[in-house]
Amino acid sequence: MTMKRTAITLADGRELIYFDERDDAVRDQPDRRRLPSPPPASQLRYDPLTDEWVALAVHRQTRTFLPPADQCPLCPSTEDRFSEIPAPEYAVAVFENRFPALSERVVAEPAAITPFTPARPGQGRCEVVCFTDDHDASFAALPPSRVRTVLDALADRTTVLSGLPGVEQVFCFENRGVEIGVTLHHPHGQIYAYPFVTPRTRSLLGAARRHAERTGGNLYADVLAAERASGERVVATNQHWTAYVPAAARWPFEVHVAPHRVVPDIPALTDPERDAFGPLYLDLLRRFDRLFDSPMPYIAAWHQAPVRVDRELGFLHLQLFSVRRAADKLKYLAGSESAMGVFINDIAPERAAELLRTA
């Protein structure tokens, strides 16, 4: 498959990249808006009690929130209305977030908050990934060829962002549904380039390291092999990928989509692996929507190995999960989950897998 990559600069200096599925696409439309300068980088504060960094991005309080369709900033521009995308149509477009939690625009080094709480600039990058120019579409409605374009765009951005100074981890994800907290309805995802390895990844790597020291094996590969051998929680599979419900799933409906080969990140996927991902993933998303005969709110999170450390311990996989546990009920993160980090699941993983297989 041929993909054409074209980068332009928006009116306020942010970068936008078109990923087109045809060679003759012309992307010379200028951004005709008058925009203020992007905000400076946020502030990171260290929590010594949890050994975690917290981002303070106060400028995000005024970000665009659920605008009507005729004011969507992710739709193509028209003669009457200019958006974040200057072109009148597009396939996939990626641009720097106008309201970023992390950015390269570092103004000054903040002082420590207390002797125990150092602070640092929120240096990194946040990008928005538009999957289609159709405002009323969804990822599940895309053809497999577009999924391949999206995957190639994520591979491109992971490679580029991994090369930025100070970036330690690249996280690609999609939030869908107001129940999840989306602020724009247009089908889109995001990419965060963090200046640290995230707490979730540190936990996964710690478990993987202990397993490797005991057995010499890759923990995720061994878990995947056990799930494939059991088959009880497998929802779908093909030559290169398996989708299964984890035996200790935290969410009512949670599925991991994993390649059969150990790879650290999206750029490491081969062409056959990238081609095989789309049909299986689209089938899975459509099963999610059929569970309750309505669009399923979900988070789709790509777990990639860190940029510089412990790459041999990582295993690329996509975690897809929903907060919906019934047609009229949501899973809230209440006391045990929010305060103690102990999840209580209302649906047995084996039952969730059965429901998804028959959806």
Image (cartoon, rainbow, N blue to C red):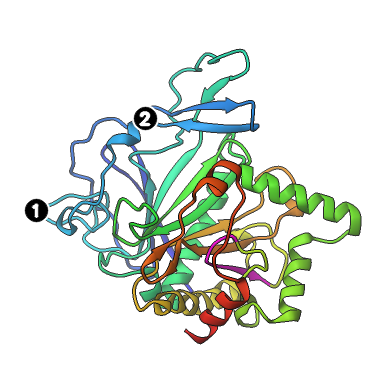
Residue 106 location in percent, x, y? Answer: 45, 25
Q: Which mark is residue 80?
A: 1
Q: In the image, which is nearer the foreground, mark 2 or mark 1?
A: 2
Residue 195 location in percent, x, y? Answer: 57, 35
For marks 2 and 1 on the same chain, the one whose residue lies earlier in the sequence: 2
State the separation of the CA atoms marked 2 and 1.
32 Å
* 169 w.r.t. 256: above or below: above
Magenta segment includes 22:
no
Residue 161 location in percent, x, y? Answer: 53, 45
Under tag 1, what secondary structure? loop
Taking depth in this image into account, of 122 and 154 the one nearest to the observer is: 122
The residue type indicated by label 1 comes to Asp
Circle 1 Cα neighbour tier, 10 Å, few/some/many (<14 / 14–19 / ≥20): few
As drawn, is 338 to the left or to the right of 78?
right
Taking depth in this image into account, of 339 and 175 the one nearest to the observer is: 339
The stretch in magenta equals 250-259
The residue type indicated by label 2 comes to Val
Q: Residue at x 83, y 50 (%)?
A: 210
Residue labelled with disc 2: 58
Q: Which mark is residue 256?
A: none
Residue 248 location in percent, x, y? Answer: 66, 64
Taking depth in this image into account, of 167 and 233 the one nearest to the observer is: 233
Would you say residue 236 is visible in this rendering?
A: yes
Q: Residue at x 85, y 61 (%)?
A: 217
Return the residue found at the far left.
Answer: 80
Q: Residue at x 70, y 51 (%)?
A: 204
Circle 2 Cα neighbour tier, 10 Å, few/some/many (<14 / 14–19 / ≥20): few
**Main secondary structure of the magenta stretch:** strand
